[in-house]
Image: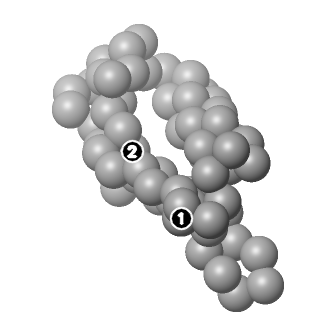
Amino acid sequence: MPFWIEKEDNIIKGFITLKETNIYTAEIYVMGVLKNYHNNGIGKMLFNAFYNYAKQNNYEFIQ
């Protein structure tokens, strides 16, 4: 599964994983951001990486 992380100073602040449910659909399998880093745009940045990957790989739907 494709996997992205946000890491700074050897601290993984957040992650997101893509799961293909069929050739047309990509799903956020799991996503998390450490509580101390909430409201810093990390979740949005991770989602954008997920979304761009899905778009580049011709998924028609995401869930």
Question: Which residue matches tag 2?
Answer: 18
Q: Nearer the viewer, residue 12 or 56?
A: 12
Q: Is residue 51 left or right of residue 63?
A: right
Q: Looking at the picture, how far across and down is residue 53, in whole percent? A: 57, 36
Q: Is residue 44 left or right of residue 8?
A: left
Question: Quadrant location of the C terminus?
Answer: top left
Question: Circle 1: is it few (<14), some (14-19), or many (20+) Cα within 10 Å?
Answer: few
In the rendered image of this protein, does residue 59 appear above or below residue 39? Answer: above
Mark 2 is on which residue type? Leu
Q: Residue 14 sits in which quadrant?
A: bottom right
Mark 1 or 2 closer to N-term? 2
Question: Quadrant location of the N terminus?
Answer: bottom left
Q: Give the residue at x 45% y 55%.
A: 32
Q: Give the residue at x 56% y 29%.
A: 51
In the rendered image of this protein, does residue 37 appear above or below residue 9? Answer: above
Question: Which residue matches tag 1?
Answer: 34
Q: Looking at the picture, how far across and down is residue 44, in whole percent? A: 65, 36
Q: Looking at the picture, how far across and down is residue 24, in whole percent? A: 31, 18
Can you see residue 40? yes
Mark 1 is on which residue type? Leu
Badge 1 element: loop
Residue 52 badge: none
